């Protein structure tokens, strides 16, 4: 079992920045990748960005060049961050942290990001 604790989110104006972070309390040994997904009202949950433990990354086309995913190891486990710049109203969604641990996917409870003037 992997417990995911998300931080960040909130209200930001268009063009602004936010940083999300998520700590996975689990042995890094079994971690395959971590990712951020988002779900806007009335829409499906989509992948935003993923990072593997060897630091390979991939991004949704809609966020390339604006969002950056990174990860670090700490005493608790693994922390993944999502730096979001040049935010747009269409980035408004609940953002979910995800971890693939020993081939099983785990999700956090989500954090709301609202981009509005």
Image (tube, grey):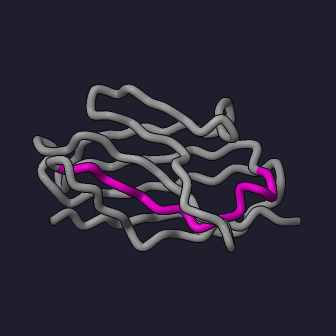
Q: Is residue 17 left or right of residue 96?
A: right
Q: Tell me which residue sits at (60%, 70%) in the image.
A: 112
- Residue 100 colored in magenta in the image: yes
Q: Position of residue 80 (x, y in %)?
A: 38, 47
Compared across the picture, whether 117 is left or right of 59 comes to right
Instruction: Please tell me in which quadrant of the rendered image residue 13 appears.
Output: bottom right
Q: Say left or right for 73 vs 51.
A: left
Q: Is residue 110 above or below residue 67?
A: below
Identify which residue, 48 or 23, lies in the foreground: 48
Q: Main secondary structure of the magenta part?
A: strand
Q: Quadrant of residue 109?
A: bottom left
Which contiguous range is marked in magenta?
88-101
- Please state, as top left, top right, bottom left or bottom right, where the C terminus lies in the image: bottom right
Instruction: Give coordinates of residue 85: x percent, y percent.
Output: 69, 43
The residue that appears at 55% across and 54% down in the rendered structure is 46
Farthest residue, direction right: 117
Q: Looking at the picture, how far across and down is residue 95, in whole percent? A: 54, 62
Residue 29 sits inside the magenta stretch: no
- Which residue is nearer to you in this view: 94 or 11? 94
Residue under the point 37% across and 56% down:
98
């Amino acid at each position: 079992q992997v417990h995911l604790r998300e931080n960040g989110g909130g209200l930001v104006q268009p063009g602004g920045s936010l940083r999300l972070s998520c700590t996975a309390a689990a042995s890094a040994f079994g971690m395959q990748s971590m990712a951020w997904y988002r779900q806007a009202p009335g829409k499906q949950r989509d992948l935003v960005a993923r990072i593997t433990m060897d630091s390979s990354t991939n991004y949704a086309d809609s966020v390339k060049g604006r969002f950056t995913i990174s990860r670090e190891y700490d005493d608790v486990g693994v922390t993944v961050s999502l730096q979001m710049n040049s935010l747009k109203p269409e980035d408004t969604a609940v953002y979910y942290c995800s971890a693939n641990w020993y081939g099983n996917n785990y999700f956090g409870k989500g954090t709301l990001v609202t981009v509005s003037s």
